[in-house]
């Protein structure tokens, strides 16, 4: 089956599910990174659909990524949440990684809020901090749009001069100020993983302009920009990069730090979505 046909089959399935549950089509998709998935479960009026039940969807294989799409009713319309994501280091192709966001775009989503757990390259960014992504550096040696262009999705050469919407960033900063939540701007540095970086690499990545580092987000964001989304990105700092302090990096610690920041994250993102879906 062609990729375009797979997209259509998944879109039709979710459209029928929403009609059956009398839920309006969503305008915003929120991708929840490591340890942040429980936020979607905080909505009382929602429908949760496992990725395994959706045609051509694949389930994440990494701990902390539940593998479900949640449609939540709010006073400001329906919001779709992607609980967990696929990663390149799991052996997935970029088309598989970006399949959910392309389906949700066809379903009606025009805004994307992408979140992740990230390591700090900046000594002023500490575990528990929320960082507003102002730009990114793609250092993994690939682009998710390589290959024949999918003309039904977007242009061959999408403009990347403003990947993360200035208007959405300003709106989030306004909400953060009102809630007295500190949120600094930073540049996200993308690597493929799955091994953590060496101290020498961290030193180089920081010199190249990165503020935080992670193994996700950028492939999705490039594909989302190609598909015409308005994009907002937020990183939750869960650890320092290797060599910044004396520590051993473990994925369990990343999830634990994300859980500690959950209250602050929920308050900020929840308020933002109620106003700007």
Image (tube, rainbow, N blue to C red):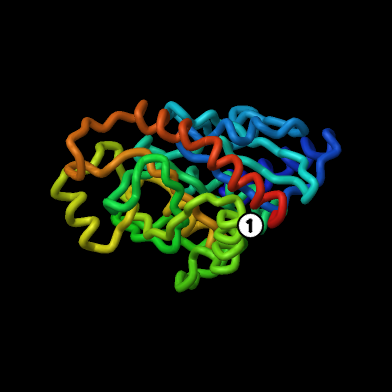
Residue ID at (70%, 45%): 79
**Residue position marked by numbered label 1 in the rendering:** 111
Q: Report whether 191 appears left or right of 98.
A: left
Closest to the observer: 156 or 43?
Answer: 43
Asked which quadrant contains residue 108, the reply is: bottom right
Residue ID at (63%, 35%): 40
Spot occupied by residue 5 in the image (x, y as percentages of width and height)? 64, 47
Number of marks present in the image shown: 1
- Quarter in which the N terminus is drawn: top right
Q: Hey, which residue is sitting farthest left in the picture?
A: 200
Answer whether residue 117 is visible to the viewer in this image: yes
Asked which quadrant contains residue 241, the reply is: top left
Establish if 186 lies above or below 96. below
Q: Report whether 151 appears left or right of 185.
A: right
Answer whether residue 145 is visible to the viewer in this image: no
Establish if 65 lies above or below 184. above
Residue ID at (34%, 58%): 138
Closest to the observer: 23 or 272?
Answer: 272
Asked which quadrant contains residue 189, the reply is: bottom left
Spot occupied by residue 13 in the image (x, y as percentages of width and height)? 72, 38
Establish if 61 lies above or below 214. above
Near mark 1 (Cα within 10 A), the count class, few <14, some 14-19 or many ≥20, is many
- Quarter in which the C terminus is drawn: bottom right
Closest to the observer: 151 or 135?
Answer: 135
Closest to the observer: 271 or 22?
Answer: 271
Residue ID at (63%, 48%): 29
Q: Report whether 107 appears left or right of 214.
A: right
Spot occupied by residue 205 in the image (x, y as percentages of width and height)? 23, 56
């Amino acid at each position: 089956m062609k990729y375009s046909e797979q997209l259509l089959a998944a879109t039709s399935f979710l459209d029928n599910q929403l009609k059956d549950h009398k839920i309006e089509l969503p305008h915003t998709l929120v991708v929840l990174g490591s340890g942040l998935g429980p936020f979607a479960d905080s909505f009382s009026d929602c429908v949760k659909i496992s990725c395994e039940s959706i045609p051509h969807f694949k389930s994440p294989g990494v701990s902390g990524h539940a593998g479900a799409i949640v449609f939540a009713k709010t006073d400001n319309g329906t919001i779709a949440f992607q609980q967990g994501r696929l990663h390149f280091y799991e052996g997935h192709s970029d088309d598989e990684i970006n399949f959910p966001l392309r389906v949700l775009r066809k379903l009606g989503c025009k805004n994307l809020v992408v979140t992740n757990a990230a390591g700090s390259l900046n000594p002023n960014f500490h575990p528990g901090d929320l960082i507003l992504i102002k730009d990114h550096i793609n250092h993994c040696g690939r682009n998710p749009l390589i290959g024949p262009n999918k003309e039904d999705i977007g242009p061959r050469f999408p403009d990347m001069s403003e990947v993360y919407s200035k208007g959405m960033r300003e709106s989030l900063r306004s909400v953060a100020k009102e809630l007295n939540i500190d949120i600094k701007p930073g540049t996200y540095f993308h690597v493929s993983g799955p091994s953590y970086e060496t101290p020498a690499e961290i030193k180089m990545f920081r010199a190249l302009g990165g503020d935080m580092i992670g193994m996700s987000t950028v492939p999705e964001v490039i594909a989302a920009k190609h598909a015409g989304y308005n994009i907002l990105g937020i990183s939750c700092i869960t650890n320092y990069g290797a060599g910044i302090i004396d520590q051993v990096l473990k994925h369990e610690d990343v999830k634990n730090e994300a859980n500690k920041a959950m209250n602050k994250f929920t308050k900020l993102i929840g308020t933002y979505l109620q106003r700007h879906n």
